[in-house]
Amino acid sequence: MSFTLSEFKSKLSGSTKGGGARASLYEVTIVGGAVITTDVSLTAPTGTGEVILVKSTQIPGETIAAETVMVAGRPVKYSGKRTYENWTTTIINDENFSIRNKVMTWMISMAGKLDSERVIALEGANPLAAGYKEGTGTVKQLGTDGAVSRTYTLSNLWPTTISPITVDWSLDGIEEFTVEWCFDTSVSS
């Protein structure tokens, strides 16, 4: 099958003049955490610039596992449960460590300090009753005109891993760290 360059360009641009989604045009917000007195929202209030400190991430993928059922001695596959891999963000570290401190506070409030004392007492079998809440993350894909073309919302989000930051006299540059997030569902709109 052959095609011309103009056919390819017309398919890529469709009814707009954008010419395809750009990997560098996105916005990430993360809101939530187990909070009583500490604000761990990663959504930037106007002018703080925290949203733009998320250097990179991905639009989350998903997997539907195959469930095999034996019928008359033959395996028949059906669609099973939908699962999501952990979501990773790379964050540029500011001199105040503001985002890193918020993520660490969120993690401490969930799992406790080294002495196992939690910021919030998770009482009984229902942690929601004790004030614990998971967060929500969004990845917005922006068009070349700056308008949001697609939004991915990640629900029941919480940080599972925060990477170390290497400090070294021979390095020059701004520090970065990654945060790996667990979540239950992803909805696009």
Image: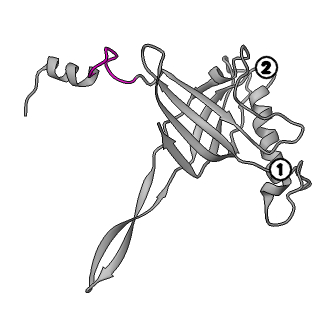
- Give coordinates of residue 41: x percent, y percent: 75, 33
Range of residues picked out in magenta: 14-21
Residue 16 located within the stretch drawn in magenta: yes
Using the rendered view, name the quadrant where residue 65 is placed.
bottom left
Q: Residue 71 versus residue 2: which sits nearer the camera? A: 71
- Give coordinates of residue 76: x percent, y percent: 29, 74
Q: Residue at x 61, y 31 (%)?
A: 90
* Quadrant of image for the N terminus: top left
The residue pinned by badge 1 equals: 131
Query: Of all residues shown, which one is farthest toward the left?
Result: 1
Does 84 sit left or right of 144 as displayed?
Answer: right
- Give coordinates of residue 91: x percent, y percent: 65, 28
Does 11 sit left or right of 44 as displayed?
Answer: left
Q: Residue at x 73, y 25 (%)?
A: 168
- Give coordinates of residue 7: x percent, y percent: 15, 22
Instruction: Choose the circle earlier in sequence order: 1 or 2.
Output: 2
**In the image, which disc is placed on residue 95?**
2
Q: Amino acid at mark 1?
A: Gly
Q: Amino acid at mark 2?
A: Glu
Residue 83 located within the stretch drawn in magenta: no
Using the rendered view, name the quadrant where residue 18 is placed.
top left
